[in-house]
Amino acid sequence: SGGSGGTMASESEAQRALQYEQTLMYGRYTQDLGTFAKDEAARLRLQEGDTPQPRRPSELLEYTQGRCGPCRVCALQCQRFLISKVGEDWVFLILLGLVMALVSWAMDFAIATCLQAQKWMYGGLDTNVLLQYMAWVTYPTVLITFSAGFTQILAPQAVGSGIPEMKTILRGVVLKEYLTLKTFVAKVIGLTCALGSGMPLGKEGPFVHIASMCAALLSRFLSLFGGFYENEARNIEMLAAACAVGVGCCFAAPIGGVLFSIEVTSTFFAVRNYWRGFFAATFSAFIFRVLAVWNKDEETITALFKTRFRLDFPFDLQELPAFAVIGIASGFGGALFVYLNRKIVQFMRRQKAINRFLMKKRLLFPALVTLIISTLTFPPGFGQFMAGQLTQKDTLVTLFDNQTWAKQGINDEFEYLGILEAWLHPRSNVFVTLVVFILMKFWMSALATTIPVPCGAFMPVFVIGAAFGRLVGESMAAWFPDGIHTDSNIYRIVPGGYAVVGAAALSGAVTHTVSTAVIVFELTGQISHILPVMIAVILANAVAQSLQPSLYDSIIRIKKLPYLPELGWGHHEKYNVRVEDIMVRDIRYVTLNCKYRDLQQVLHSTKMKNLPLVESAESMILLGSIERAQVGALLSAQLSPQRRLLTLRQKVLPEDGHQLSDSSIRFQISTETSSGTPARAALRKPLKPALKRVSSSPADSPPAGSPDHTGIALKSLFCANAATEPTEAQGTAYHKAKRVRISIVEEMILGDKMTPTEILEWEEQQLDQLVDFSSAKIDPAPFQLVEHTSLHKTHTIFSLLGLDHAFVTSIGRLVGMVSLKELRKAIEGSLTGKGVKVRPPLASFRDSTASTSEADTTALRQLWDRHQHHHMPREAGP
Amino acid sequence: SGGSGGTMASESEAQRALQYEQTLMYGRYTQDLGTFAKDEAARLRLQEGDTPQPRRPSELLEYTQGRCGPCRVCALQCQRFLISKVGEDWVFLILLGLVMALVSWAMDFAIATCLQAQKWMYGGLDTNVLLQYMAWVTYPTVLITFSAGFTQILAPQAVGSGIPEMKTILRGVVLKEYLTLKTFVAKVIGLTCALGSGMPLGKEGPFVHIASMCAALLSRFLSLFGGFYENEARNIEMLAAACAVGVGCCFAAPIGGVLFSIEVTSTFFAVRNYWRGFFAATFSAFIFRVLAVWNKDEETITALFKTRFRLDFPFDLQELPAFAVIGIASGFGGALFVYLNRKIVQFMRRQKAINRFLMKKRLLFPALVTLIISTLTFPPGFGQFMAGQLTQKDTLVTLFDNQTWAKQGINDEFEYLGILEAWLHPRSNVFVTLVVFILMKFWMSALATTIPVPCGAFMPVFVIGAAFGRLVGESMAAWFPDGIHTDSNIYRIVPGGYAVVGAAALSGAVTHTVSTAVIVFELTGQISHILPVMIAVILANAVAQSLQPSLYDSIIRIKKLPYLPELGWGHHEKYNVRVEDIMVRDIRYVTLNCKYRDLQQVLHSTKMKNLPLVESAESMILLGSIERAQVGALLSAQLSPQRRLLTLRQKVLPEDGHQLSDSSIRFQISTETSSGTPARAALRKPLKPALKRVSSSPADSPPAGSPDHTGIALKSLFCANAATEPTEAQGTAYHKAKRVRISIVEEMILGDKMTPTEILEWEEQQLDQLVDFSSAKIDPAPFQLVEHTSLHKTHTIFSLLGLDHAFVTSIGRLVGMVSLKELRKAIEGSLTGKGVKVRPPLASFRDSTASTSEADTTALRQLWDRHQHHHMPREAGP
C-alpha cells in the first residue's frame, strides 16, 4: 500500500487501513467511470426520448375518469413539481437545517430534564448527606456507563468528538460506518446521556458529526426521489455545509458556525460553498431559537447567553494589556490542555496491565472517571469550593454576569442572588473559588474527554476560559475600583467582558481557530468587546500554534488517521525544500510490455497501492497508474482454472485450439535484465486445511476485477507475505485468494484432469506471457509533479486536490514518487529543525536565467537519441 | 496565444493581452527555476560556509576599539536581530496594518476637511442663493475633475474600484503597473479628492487596492533587508491578507473585512492564510480606532456607526416577514444596480459620437456628471426633498438613528434635532423624502461610479440600502404604533434596525456576499439583529445571484479581464457535461523528432501560447509543453547570422569545420507526411526602410532564449502575420525580430559574404534539420485532464490551481486541450440553457461496473502493438 497505506507502519495502523478507502478528488479519473457515465447517459437519454410524452396522458386519463379527477391531476402535478424540486440544493439545506434544529432542541430538552432530575434527587435528599452523595455520584455514573456501553455495542464509531473524522472524510478519505444510521442513533442517544450526566463534556464536536450523518442519511433518503444525490462531489459539498449546521444549531451561531467548521475541517475552502453553509446554518439557528420561543422559554429570538454590558463605554484603552495577558496565558493553557489530553490517552494505552484489565471490562474506565469527578464536585464536599452544583450552562450564565463580584466598597455591597450564590463561600472569597474551579476543571475536562462516549471538549474549555477571564477581570476590578479612565465619568471595569474574552481565547487556543471570537459574539449577543476578543484570540492562537497541534489534529494523530500536517507560520524553509529531496526514487513500476511474471514480482516487492505504468523500462515515460488490486486481478485472471481448462480442451481439439491460443500467447525477448524469479521454496510450504468452503461462481467474468479464481502460482505471493501478515487493504484480496485457492484444490480433486505438477508447469508458462492490459482499469492521468517543485507548493497541491500520492516526472519520464508519508516526514522534519536538509532562501523566481539543468538535458538527449535509433531501422526496413 | 491569449478575440482584447502575463501556480514548473534555485543555493551555501565566522569578530573588533564600543556592539547585534526578524510574516503584517491604518485615518481626516470646507463655503454664502449654488456646484466639479485628470496623467490603472483587478491578480494573472508606487500615489490622492467632493462614491474597493499596493511596495522595500520577500507564493499570500486589511481598516471591521475580501477576491481560500488576514486586519482596525481616540474624536474604541437599540427585545418574531421582504426587494434592487451600471458603461462606449468627443476632452464627462448630481442635491433646490445637505456619513448616522421619525401619537411628538432636521420637510413627510432619496441616489450612484476616478460603489449602495430599510421600518412603525407584540410589555418597532438590515441586504446583493452581515455588526457595534440581517442577506443574495453577476464580476467582464465564471447554484448539468464535450481536439503540437520547418509551420498555424511536446505524431505521448516564445527562440537561434557566418567559416576551413558541424547537423527522413512548406511569396514583399538601429550584441548566448538575431526565413513568419497584425503577446517577439532583421540587412551589406539567394538556400537547408530541444525551456509536467472529467471537476481544478489551459490525455496520449475560453463558453452555455449538450444525471460513480471503453482499449492496443513492432527489430539487430 504505497499511498496512504504506505504510511502505515504498525499493526494497529494496518488494521485501520482496512477500514478506509481513498477516494481522491483527483485520483478518481479511472476509465470505468467515464464508460459507466456514457452508458448511463445513453440509457437515460433513451428513456427520456420515448417515455414521458406518451406515458403522461394515459396516467392523467386514469385519474380524470374518476369523480374528483381535476383534484387528483392537480395533486399529481404538485407531487411531480415537488419531486423535481427535491433535487434543488436549497430544499436539501432547509430540510437539513430543520432536522438538525429539531434534533438539537430535543437533545437540549432531554439533557435539561436529565440535569433537572439530578438536581431534584439531590435536593430531595438533603436530610442525609450520605444518601445525597450516593444520588449525586450514582446518577452520572449510571448515565455515562450506559452511554459508553450503548455506543460500544451499537456503533463504536460514535465515540468522541467526530471533528477529526469529519476533517479526514472531507479530505477525501472514506471512513466506513462513520455516516450510517446506526452511528447516528448511537451518537444522539450516547451524547444525550453523556451530557445529561453533568460531566464536563461538550456537544459541539459531536454535533458536527451528527449533522454530517444527518446530511448523509437525508441525501440517501432523498435519492429515492431522484438521482441528484448520488453525485459524490455534491455530497462532499453538502457535508461541508452540514458541519456548519452542526456548530450553528448547537450555539445558535450561524456565522461563527460556518467559520468554525471551515477552520476546523478544511485546508482549502471553496467560496462557492460558502452560501450553502450560511443558508443552512442560519435556517437551523433560526428554527432552533424559534422553538425556544414556542416553548415559552424566551419572549423573542435572542442570543443563547445574552449579556447586558454597557454599550457606551465597553472598555478602556488601558485595559488592553490585561486582555493581551489573557490571550497569551490562554495560549499556554490551550497547549497544555492538548498536551494533557494526549498524554492521558497515551498513558492509558501504554500501561499494558491497566489496559488489559480495562479492555476486558470496557465500562470500568468511564465509571471510574465519572466516580472520581462527581465525588470531587459533590457540593457539600469539595464542590463547595468550585461551584460544584452549577451545571455547565449555569456556570456560563454566572460567569458572563454583568455585576462585579469582588467587594468594591461599603455602599456598593453586592448581594449574591440566585445561582450566583454558588460562587460565594462563606469562609473564602471569590478569587479562591475561581482559582480552584479553573485548576480542578482543567484536568477534569482533559480526563473526561478521553472517556469512550460521544463527547466534545469545546464547551468545557470554553467554560474554563470564561472562568479564567473572570478571574482576571475581578482582579482588575479589585485593583481599579473606579475604573482606569480618570475623566469626568466613572466607568467601572466589567469583569463579565473579561470572561467573554477568556472564553474565546482559550477555546480558540485549543482548537486553533480564530472564529471562536465570532461564536462568542453570537452567543452573548454583544459585539462591543470585538477588539479585545480579537487581540486575545490571535495572541492565544499564536502561542498555542507554536507549541502544540490543535486538539483535533492531536486526535487525528492519536487515531492514526491519514493527515497532512499544516505548514507552520514563518517557516521559510518550506519554500526551499524541493520534491527531489523528499521523493522516493526507487519505485516499482509496470511496463506496457511486461510479462505476468513481472507483475507477480512487482506485487512481491512493493506495497504501493497504485503502481505507475510506464511505456518501457528504458524510456520510463509515464502512461498512467494502475491499482494494485487491478494488477492482482490481471494475474489471477491469467492463472484462472477456467483458462487452464480451456487450454486443456484446446489440447484435446488442437485444430481450433491453435487459433484461439495464437492471439493470446506471444513470446518476447525483453531487453530488461530479468531480476530473477522469486524463490520457489515458498511453494513447498504445507497448505493449510480448508476452513471454509467458498461458493465459487465460475460465471464471473474476469474483467469484473475481483480475484475470483486464482492458480497455485499466486500461492507464492501470499505465502511470502504470510510471515509479515497481509497488513493492508490489499490483504483482503489475499485472503479472498486464499479461500478461493482452497476451493480450487477441491475442484482439482473433483474434476481437473491436470496433476499439480502439470498445473505448475502450465502456470509457469502462463507467467511468461505478455500482459494484456485491455481489461484493466488504468488511471490515465495520475497526478504529476516535477523535481523542482517546492515543499510549500507540493503541500498546497496535496491539500488542494486531496492527493495521497503523486508521481514525479521529468519530461514525461517517471523519476520518483511522493506520498503523504514522505511529505509528512519532510514537514515535520523541517519544522523540528532536523530531517530534510534546508536550503537558503532563493532569490526571485522571475528573473532567473535560462540555463537548463545538466541532468535534464542529458535525459532529453537520451530520449531524442533513442528516437533516432528507433526510427532509423524502420525507415531502412520498408 | 493558446491559453488565456486564445480567449482574446477582438483587437482591444489583444492589446490588453500585452499588459498581462500568466503566472500560474501550476504552470511555473519550468526547468530553469530549478536550475537557478540550485545555483543560488550552492552560492549561498558557499557564502554561509566561510564568511560569517571569520568576518564577525573583525567587525566587532573595529567597534570595540572605539570609546563607546560596547554600545555599538550592542546596537549592531540589535540591528542584526531586527534584520533577521524582518523576514517574519508577523512583522510584515504589523507594518502593513500600521501603514494602512495611518493612510486610512489620514485620508478620512482629509476627506472630512474637504467636506467641512464645502459646508463652510455653502453656509457662509447664505445671503445669495446663486453664489451658494455656484459654490455648491463648483467645489465638487473642481475636485472630481482634478481627481480624474491627476489619475489619468499619473496612473490610469488607479481608476475605479480595484477589487476586480485584485481578483484577477490573485488568480495568478500579472496585471502590469497595478501594484506600483505611481498607482498608489494616484489612487490615494485621487480617492481623497473624489470622496472629498461629496459625490456618492465609496472607499471600500479602492482601499482593497491601496492595501494591496501597500503590501507590494512594503515587500519590495523589506526585501532590501533579506531575500524572503521575493518568493512569489508568499507575495500572493500577503496580497490576500492585504485585501482583508483594506476592508478592515476602512470600516474598522476586522472580521467582516477578512470575510468580505475572501468572498470578493477568491474562489478557493487556503485556511492557513486565514490568520494572516485576521492578524493584520485586527491590528489595522485597532490602530485606526486608537487614532480616533488619540485625536479626541472618541472616548474609547467603539464602532464607527454605533447604534443604541434596546437589547432585551430587539425585534418581534412577527416582524420577520418584513425583514424577508427587505431582503427580496434588495435582491432585485441589487441586480438592477449592477445592470444599470453596466448599461451606462456600455452606452457610453457604444455612442461613437459622444465617445469621440469625450475621448478628446477626457475630463468633460466627470465634470458633467458632477454638475448634474450636485445641481440635483443643492439643498435649497431639489436637495431639500432628499436630505441633500447631509454627507454620506451623516446620512448613515441619521438612518441608523434609534428614534422613530413618523409621528406616532400626540404625547409622543418627536423633535427633529441637529442633523436629523434634514429629513424633515415642512410641506412633505418623511416617507416622501425617503422615497425621493432612494430613487435619486440609486441612479446617481450607478452613474457616479462610472466616472474615471478612483472610487467604489459599496458605500453608496450601503446608504441606499439603509434608506430603503428605514422606509420599510418607518412604514411598519406607522402601521403598528405600539408594536406587534401584545403581551404585558409594549415593545415599539425600531426603524433603525430595519435600516441596518436594509444596508446589509442591498450591499450584499450588489457584491454577492454574505459577509456584509458581519460588516454591519462591526460597523454598528450591535449584533442583536443577527437573524433578520442573515435572513435578508441570504434572500437578497439568492435573488441577485440568479439575475445578475456581482458588480465586480460585471466590471471584470466589461474590462475583459481573464476570468472563470462561477458555477451557479442548483445547476445539475455541470456534473454531466464532460471535458470531451468541450475540448479542442484539433490542436497543433511539436514532436520530439520534428524539423525546424515544422516549428515554423506550427507557429504559423496556431496562436496557442503553450505548445504541447509529444514523443511522435504516431504515439502522441505527451512529454511536456513548450512556450511559444521558446519555439520562436529556437527557430531564430537556428537561423541566426552567427551560425551562418560559422558555416561560412567552416567552408573556408573545411578540416575543423567538419568536426563542428557534424554534431549539430543531422539528417533524418521523417515518417510524417510533410504538410508542404509555407508560401514563399511573402518573401518577395519589399522590405521597409530601417527606422531604428538596434544595438545587436553578438556575444549573447543562444540558450538565453531571446530572439536576438534572426534570419530571412523568419520574414515569412511575420509577413504572413502582417495582414492580421501581430495581435498578441507573441507580437512583441515579432516586432523585435523585425527590428533585428533590419540590422541584419545592414550587417549583410557590411560584412556578410553571402548573397540573399545563398542565405535563402542556407536557411532552407537549416530548416530541414532536426530540432535540438536541449536549449529550450520545457515545462515537464503540464496539467493533464482526462476526457471523462466532469465540467464541475474541471472548473474546480482550474480555479484551485489557477490554470489557464490543460491538456487532455488518455493513457499518456494527447487527445485535446481545454482552455479558460472553452470552459467559460461551456459554463455560460450550460447556464443559459443552450450551448453544450447536457446529459441526464448519472447514477452512482462508486458502483460502476468495470468495463473499459472501446476507444481506450483500442488506443492501448495500438500503443502496445507499436511497441512490439519497435522492439522486435532491435532484438533482432544486435
Image: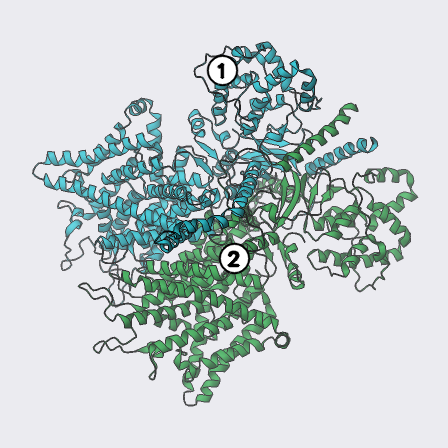
Chain colours: A cyan, B green
* Chain of residue at mark 1: A
Tell me, yes or no, if residue A676 can be seen here. Answer: no
Q: Residues within 10 Å of mark 2 (few under 14, many from 20)?
A: many
User: Which residue in the protein does label 2 denote?
Assistant: B215
**Residue B117 location, x and y as percent?**
44, 79
Given the image, on which type of amino acid does mark 2 rest? Ala
- In front: A495, or B391? B391
Q: Is residue B599 left or right of residue A274?
A: right
Residue appearing at x 46%, y 85% in the figure: B133
Q: Is residue A761 above or below residue B203?
A: above
Q: Is residue B119 left or right of residue A720?
A: left
The tag on residue A742 is 1
- Among the 4 quarters of the image, the one containing residue B52: top right
Tell me, yes or no, if residue A686 can be seen here. Answer: yes
Given the image, on which type of amino acid does mark 1 rest? Ile
| The N terminus of chain B - image quarter | bottom right
Q: Residues within 10 Å of mark 1 (few under 14, many from 20)?
A: many
Q: Is residue A869 above or below residue A81?
A: above
| The C terminus of chain B - image quarter | top right
